[in-house]
Image: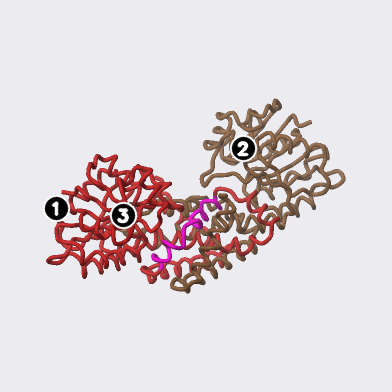
Chain colours: A red, B brown
């Protein structure tokens, strides 16, 4: 049923989807589109796409001819494409996305898609990525063992079931969630760690960045603890701006809770409350590393 | 000159020092002491020590007969041993430590050691470790490529120079710092990441730990970002209590700065200030991953 696929956004995730499709035995056409000509060229060279649209107009034409359109761009761009594509598509077609937030996308999907005479839309979110993006870093195994979340709108259709089968063939475990719950959980396990890492790296840059001697000391003395807690500081604003704009309240809530928790620990560096914090943290980790 | 070594504390760091000494060609005696009989047995089985003292009294006797005593226990226990050993030792002997904070240890070293008729004390701190300890995790390569900090008290003696040569043979890079500066820098690059990770893990445990469904969702959805930012949550209170007690002001300062930075980011999730935070964080990371 799915024999022609258009991937909009051939960066890390989009290109990895193309590679994973081929690895899983998909024999149909894969067309790509990206605002960056170099990303498109890298995706084609990697074998993630077999051809590409040269302009938005060509991409919309390619979408008309596709069975499945995968939107693998930042969240606000996904919503732009959802609006552009809705009037061009027909009920036999499926659009899906890989955006980091789901509530606003699912709301738009319910308004513009999944109705009589419109195409279907299945909101999706593979929990895979790197702090740096780009087709050059794409990997056929990126989704192996990862969780691929869906926040479906209405009952499942045949073409949706077929796309889920491909995702399972990528080695991912699928999990369905309510979109508001998705955004709340992702605020805790993904967006908060990102903002924390960005804040810590920005604070260190502000505090020590201007002094070469301090920079050398930080580089010499900082080990794995510093590397891991600031690694996500390398993540691009372009992607996270959209996450912040479309999930502001849940992210603000988690940040506020963490600020209070840090203040509590700070005020208890000399009291038995510090022991209680370590006990809770030890228990959290023991659940994950049994 | 160094032909008999006593290692007090045969956990991860103490046992790794024993293994690294052997690997580097040290042919003298290595005696161990640990409050835990099972740690002592594990250290001996691993080949990190050739024999051990069975009691504190025996350990003090072994110290009298040693050229070098390595204190590889938490900071407050290091200070206890410094006080117990000082009256028992003579000027030809060197005591060194591996404690995570240095100002209070260096102050005590200046009072009880490095004087006429006392032994020498060289405060040290290898930047190596794991979130879990114990002799069973000891590695001969633990210090390879790591930075081994010293905060020397007075001019270098021959036996200090000899110990530094062994440390260099472990593959570590040595760096001398003023002890107050050591504690300030370590607050930023080690103690703050630890407290942050403990706070985040404790907050997640408090928020989701009691609900099995939430725990499953967190486990399924949380990826590398969550794992890396909470990994240090597994660290033991027993070690970090002493760090908090002996470096309270610098740690409290870094925590307070981070709380303010997180609040600033939270208040700017929709403004161009978010871009500036990502720019600074990107620059910090680019210095480390050029």
Residue farthest along the left direction in this orientation: A116
Dot 1 corresponds to which residue?
Answer: A158
Asked if the stretch drawn in magenta spans residue A242, the answer is yes
* Alpha carbon separation for disc pair 1 and 2: 57 Å
Front tag of 1 and 3 = 3
Front tag of 1 and 2 = 1
* Alpha carbon separation for disc pair 1 and 3: 28 Å
Secondary structure state at the residue bearing disc 1:
helix
Dot 3 corresponds to which residue?
Answer: A53
Residue B48 percent coordinates (x, y): 61, 31
Q: Earlier in the sequence, mark 1 or mark 3?
A: 3
Q: Nearer the viewer, residue A202 or B80?
A: A202
The answer to whether residue A114 is above or below residue B71 is below
Chain under callout 3: A
Q: Nearer the viewer, residue B241 or B150?
A: B150
The answer to whether residue B50 is above or below residue B192 is above
Front tag of 2 and 3 = 3
How crowded pointer 1 is (Cα within 10 Å; few <14, some 14-19, many 20+) is rated as few
Chain under callout 1: A
The answer to whether residue A42 is above or below residue B202 is above
- Identify the residue at image location x=79%, y=44%: B87
The quadrant in which the N terminus of chain B is found is top right
Residue B20 percent coordinates (x, y): 63, 33
Which portion, as a residue range, is magenta?
A225-244
Residue farthest along the right direction in this orientation: B116
Left or right? Give the position of B18 relative to A170. right
Q: Quadrant of residue B169?
A: top right
Residue A277 percent coordinates (x, y): 49, 59
Secondary structure state at the residue bearing disc 2:
loop
Dot 2 corresponds to which residue?
Answer: B144
* Badge 2 vs badge 3, beta-carbon distance below 8 Å: no
């Amino acid at each position: 049923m799915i024999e022609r696929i258009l991937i909009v956004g051939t960066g890390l995730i989009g290109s990895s989807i193309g590679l994973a499709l081929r690895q899983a035995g998909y024999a149909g056409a894969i067309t790509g589109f990206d605002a960056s000509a170099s990303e498109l060229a890298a995706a084609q060279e990697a074998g993630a796409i077999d051809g590409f649209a040269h302009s938005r107009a060509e991409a919309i034409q390619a979408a008309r001819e596709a069975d499945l359109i995968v939107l693998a761009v930042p969240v606000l761009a996904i919503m732009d494409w959802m609006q552009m594509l809705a009037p061009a598509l027909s009920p036999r077609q499926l659009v899906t996305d890989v955006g980091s937030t789901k509530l606003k996308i699912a709301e738009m999907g319910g308004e513009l898609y999944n109705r009589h005479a419109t195409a279907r839309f299945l909101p999706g979110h593979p929990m895979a990525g790197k702090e740096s993006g780009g087709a050059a870093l794409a990997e056929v195994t990126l989704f192996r063992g990862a969780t691929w979340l869906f926040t479906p709108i209405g009952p499942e259709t045949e073409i949706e079931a077929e796309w889920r089968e491909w995702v399972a063939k990528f080695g991912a475990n699928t999990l369905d969630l309510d979109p508001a719950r998705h955004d709340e959980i992702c605020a805790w396990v993904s967006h908060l760690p990102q903002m924390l890492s960005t804040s810590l790296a920005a604070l260190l840059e502000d505090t020590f960045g201007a002094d070469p001697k301090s920079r050398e000391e930080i580089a010499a003395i900082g080990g794995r603890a510093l590397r891991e807690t600031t690694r996500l500081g390398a993540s691009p604003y372009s992607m996270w701006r959209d996450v912040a704009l479309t999930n502001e309240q849940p992210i603000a809530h988690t940040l506020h809770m963490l600020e209070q928790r840090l203040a509590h620990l700070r005020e208890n560096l000399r009291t038995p409350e510090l022991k209680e914090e370590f006990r809770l943290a030890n228990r959290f980790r023991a659940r994950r590393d049994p």
